[in-house]
Amino acid sequence: MKYRIGHGYDIHRLVPGRPLVLGGVKFDTAYGLDGHSDADCLTHAICDAILGAAGLPDIGHFFPNTDLAYRDINSQLLLQRVCSEVIKLGFNLANLDATVIAEKPQIYPRLAEIKLTLARSAGLLPDEIGLKATTNEGVGDLGRGLAIAAHAVALLSRS
């Protein structure tokens, strides 16, 4: 089997009055992530990791923020489309690993729910997804609670 690894990163600023969605799960907050789609930085980082492993351009190439068709779109739909594209190229998604970096809200209590949502969208089992949450220890915009970021790694296989 041939294996390919990709890394993805995304960050979005927090703004008042938008829904906060991470990994397809909505959080009950008065703020959310600013962006063209639902601004789900975790799912966007995962999409970029998968696309990178397949040697494809990033998420913005496939779903540009200038296209009104993607305005406020559920990023789980984008993840499903990304997975479908790499399958067409003969790859299988083996596993994902991701870290969310946020001072607020608390992510840890929702990790299992996020894993289930991502697993459904990516066609994986929940135990094929590693997911962690951390803070930025008060450093920079992330540490001041002005943004949320995520890193992700994807492993693709091809027989």
Image (cartoon, rainbow, N blue to C red):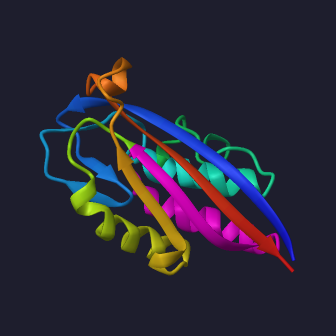
User: Is residue 100 among the parts visible in the rendering?
Assistant: yes
Q: Which residues are magenta?
A: 72-100
Residue 32 placement, left or right of 132: left
Please provide percent x and percent y for residue 63.
59, 47
User: Is residue 59 among the parts visible in the rendering?
Assistant: no
Residues 141 and 57: in front is 141
Residues 4 and 52: in front is 4
Please provide percent x and percent y for residue 6.
70, 52
Q: Considering only vertical position in the picture, is 139 above or below 15? A: above
Q: Residue furthest top?
A: 140
Which residue is rendered at x = 36% and y = 60% of the image?
24
Which residue is rendered at x = 56% and y = 40% of the image?
9
Please provide percent x and percent y for residue 138.
29, 23
Residue 117 placement, left or right of 43: left
Residue 38 placement, left or right of 8: left
Residues 64 and 156: in front is 156
The verdict on residue 87 being magenta is: yes
Residues 76 and 54: in front is 54
